[in-house]
Amino acid sequence: MNSFSGGIHPPETKNTSSVRIEEIPLPKKVVIPLSQHTGAPSKPVVKAGDIVKTGQLIADVAGFISAKIHSPVSGKILSIEPCLHPSGYNVESIIIESDGKDEKVEFIPNDPDKLFPDEMVELIKNAGIVGLGGAAFPTHVKLSPPQGKTINSVILNGCECEPYLTCDYRVMLEETKEILGGLKLIIKILNIEHGYIGIEDNKRDAIKAFNVSSAEDPAFKEKLKIVKLKTKYPQGAEKQLIKAILKKNVPSGKLPMDVGCIVQNVQTAKVIYDAVYKGKPLYERVITVAGSVRRPGNLRVRFGTPLAEVIDYCGGLIGNVRKVIAGGPMMGISQFSLDVPVVKGTSGVVILTEEESKYYEPSNCIKCGRCIDVCPMGLVPAFISRFAEKRSIVSVEDLKNFNPLDCMECGSCAYECPAKIHLVQNIKLAKMIVQNRKI
């Protein structure tokens, strides 16, 4: 079965896979960070005291790699000030008090058959769409490859390999046609012949749903290949997907487009459909709330909604809670406050008890090589980590030959390490040293 070298098999714990998507009530107040994407923070186009509608532009792009931001509620702009972000930093944010009316701007639908590719890319840009798989890279930039970069394949990522998370799975089951419609648009924009949807073999219902729905359009069915992949973490990472499906290796320091491919998340394809067909900007997404809450589920949540409100909607915390993570347990960020908002890159909220998130004091490396065996990028995590701790094994220039910047921080090495060494944290430090950043 299609897969990649390395990887791990953590317990899936996908107890919300059968729970249909619910829409959470409107928040009373939202906090909208101006940095919700890779690239330059957006610049506000509103000020305190302004009255806004749902879907109205409140922040514009501030560079080529940047994204627009739209109001998730109707109401009044209270202030623009630094607020806590899920990353752990204070970020300039727009605070809006909801009027509870959810009065929307007019969404203008479009006929894609009457649009040129660059016009569709402009609609996607104006909708503020970024990748919803986690990295939040502005989608209009991905769909505008520079001269000399020929794209011949697009892959939709339907793997959702992080434990606990099932939001993409539910979107695949409940909004199958919209995802396929978004994929059609991507294929048209890039003028390519084939599209792929990669889905792990533990999601057979999703594979069936795509096969049934795509059969309604025989011409499109000819361009589409649904690839069943081995269930393994991190199967959904871009370079691993490309290796598993196209048998191509993305070279160190290069991007998927360097091998003629782009990868998009299935939820991203769905909101591309919404932007082009319906004229709807991105101001909400589906997330999973799982773990130690009374009523775990999959929720459609407006951006800016505090985690506290999301958890309260799910019945509140239960048990001896030790960690609340924004994202999945492998790559998500542990939060020290529930006042942080849901942002474009928030795929879930995972709540772990003391027993599920035990802290182990690290011991000395026993040179077992397990971290090397499981690293999906073929790195030597123990060596890179040891450099960050000692700073005297090799020079920084020699360290670069071990390609620490290729680390995607998936956590496979730390999960497998019997000595419980903080490998990911140490590799992050090594990356900062190589990039000559202050530490």
Image: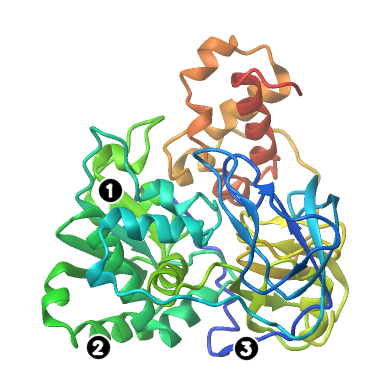
Instruction: Report the Cα–Cα distance between label 1 and label 3.
Output: 34 Å
Q: Is residue 198 above or below residue 238?
A: below
Alpha-carbon span between mark 1 and mark 2: 26 Å
Give the position of the N terminus as an image quadrant. bottom left
Residue 300 in percent (x, y) is at 62, 80
Which residue lies under the disc numbered 1?
A: 261
The reply to whether the C-beta atoms of the residues labelled 3 and 2 are less than 8 Å apart is: no
- The quarter of the rendered structure image containing the C terminus is top right
Residue sitting at 44 percent across and 53 percent down? 139
Q: Position of residue 295 (x, y in %)?
A: 73, 88
Residue 66: image quadrant is: top right
Mark 3 to mark 2: distance in Å? 24 Å
What residue is drawn where x is 31% and y is 59%? 155
Q: Is residue 90 above or below residue 54?
A: above
Secondary element at tag 2 = helix
Q: Amino acid at mark 3?
A: Glu
Of pointers 1 and 2, the one earlier in the residue sequence: 2
Q: Earlier in the sequence, mark 3 or mark 2?
A: 3
Q: Which residue is mark 2?
A: 212
Q: Which residue is mark 3?
A: 22
Q: Identify which amino acid the numbered label 2 is placed on.
A: Val
Q: Secondary structure at mark 1?
A: strand
Q: Position of residue 137 (x, y in %)?
A: 51, 49
Asked if one can make out residue 62 in the rendered structure from this viewpoint, the answer is yes
Mark 1 neighbour class, 10 Å CA radius: few under 14, some 14 to 19, many 20 or more? many
Residue type, mark 1 in image: Cys
**First in sequence: mark 1 vs mark 3:** 3
Residue 352's spot in the image, x, y percent?
76, 69
Res 358 → quadrant: bottom right
Left or right of 273, for residue 43: right
Location of residue 141 with respect to 198 vertically, above or below: above
